[in-house]
Amino acid sequence: MNEPTILDLFSGIGGFSLAFESEGFRTIGFAEIDPYASAVLRKHWPDVPNFGDIRTITRDTVPGRIDVLTGGFPCQPFSVAGKQRGKEDDRYLWPSMLDVVRATRPAWIVGENVPGIVGMGLADMLVDLEACGYRAQPFIIPACAVGAPHRRDRVWIIANSIRFRRP
């Protein structure tokens, strides 16, 4: 199969996979620990493995080429609805996502989080990606920009591997 592939981390009920599959991508794996979300993934993608805890993923875990790695890593460490403990929060899982990036070397990375990340770790995340051979650009896009009736800003991190760039 020649269709581009996606590895969907912090998968929830598969929103990233739905979006990418509508554009011709094939999901090759999920990483989701929530039982309800995992059941939804199993129902809609019965042949796609759910690797569960992102901290267990290695290069040997994920077969084949990964064109896009996605992840809406936990927002609680940065959210104004929480204590905004950032890196001190047990749910701060950016390092685990970065470990998967290092292990799998996808061509593209798409991350998503809340605006609180801007002052609590985004700069470090961009440096981490650059150190791994990626050029990254964050974007703040409100939901109303894509037709939703509310603002609800989200930070999107789009990164491309320098080795996959064309001259």
Image (tube, rainbow, N blue to C red):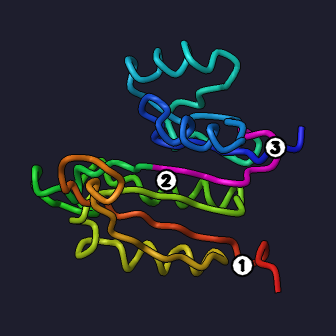
Q: Count neighbours of disc 1 (C-alpha within 10 A) and say few if under 14, some if 14 to 19, many if 20 or more.
A: some
Query: Residue 96's mark?
Result: 2
Residue 4 pos. (x, y %): 77, 48
**Residue 162 part of the magenta segment:** no
Q: Count neighbours of disc 2 (C-alpha within 10 A) and say few if under 14, some if 14 to 19, many if 20 or more.
A: some
Circle 3 or circle 2, nearest the eye: 3
On the image, numbered disc 3 is attached to which residue?
3
Range of magenta residues: 61-71
Tell me the residue at 69%/56% (across/down): 103
Picture quadrant where residue 124 is located: bottom left
The amino acid type of the residue labelled 3 equals Glu
On the image, numbered disc 1 is attached to which residue?
162
- Quadrant where the C terminus sits is bottom right
Q: Count neighbours of disc 3 (C-alpha within 10 A) and say few if under 14, some if 14 to 19, many if 20 or more.
A: few
Which secondary structure class fits the magenta region best? Answer: loop
Residue 157 pos. (x, y %): 46, 66
Residue 57 pos. (x, y %): 62, 42
Picture quadrant where residue 115 is located: bottom left
Looking at the rendered structure, the secondary structure element under dot 3 is loop
Q: Is residue 75 left or right of residue 15?
A: left
